[in-house]
Image: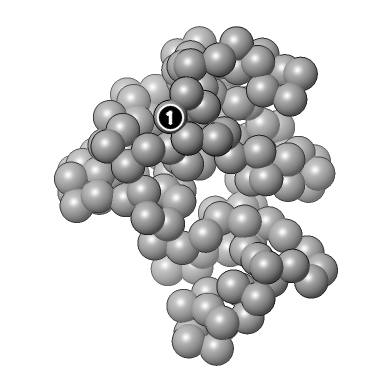
Amino acid sequence: MDYRSFWNNDSYAVVGHSQRKPFPTISYGKLKERGKKVFPVDPSVQEIKGEVAYPDFVSLPEAVDAAVLELPRDETKDWVEKAAAAGIRNVWIHMGRETPEAIALAAEKGLNLWYGTCAVMYLSEGFSVHSIHAWVNKALKRY
C-alpha cells in the first residue's frame, strides 16, 4: 500500500471529537496549506480554527474524496460506517485508532483504507518530530 497516494485527493473531511481528544489541527492545517479543500467534522463543537465544524458527513456542504479519522478509538468503527454510507471511498485511520472491527467493516464495504501510521509524517515538510518519524519508517520500509 502506498500511503503517500492517499494525500493526492482533492477534498477531505478531517474527523475528530474535541470533547474527548484534541481535534487533529495539524493534519487539518497541513492539508489546507497544500491547497486541499478541507472540512472539519466534529460533533462536539461548533467551530474549528474559525471555521464551521460539521457534526457528520451528511452535513457537509459538498461531497469529499476522502476522510481522515483521528478520534477516540472506540468511535472509529462507527465513523467508518458513516463514511461508507456517505459515499466516501478513501479513509485514513490515524495510527493507534484502528480496530479489527473498523478494518473488517471497511473491507466489507469495499473502502480504500489506510491505517497503522501517522498522517502528519506525510503532510509535514522540513525538520520536525514528524520528519524523524517518517525517516524511521522509510528505513524500516513502512513508509
Callout 1 secondary element = loop
The image position of residue 7, as x and y in percent, is 61, 53
Q: Residue at x 61, y 73 (%)?
A: 134
- Residue 126: percent from the left, percent from the top? 81, 68
Residue 4 seen in render: yes
When asked about the image quadrant of residue 23, the answer is top right
The spot of residue 13 in percent (x, y) is 56, 31
**Amino acid type assigned to the residue bearing label 1 in the image:** Arg
Rendered view: 89 above or below 39: below
Quadrant where the N terminus sits is bottom left
Q: Residue at 60%, 26% (x, y): give it.
A: 40
Residue 81: image location, x then y, percent? 28, 30
Residue at position x 58%, y 40% in the image: 24
User: Disc 1 designates what residue?
Assistant: 20
* 10 Å crowding of disc 1: few (<14), some (14-19), many (20+): few
Q: Residue furthest bottom?
A: 139
The residue that appears at 27% across and 37% down in the rendered structure is: 74
Q: Is residue 112 above or below residue 32?
A: below
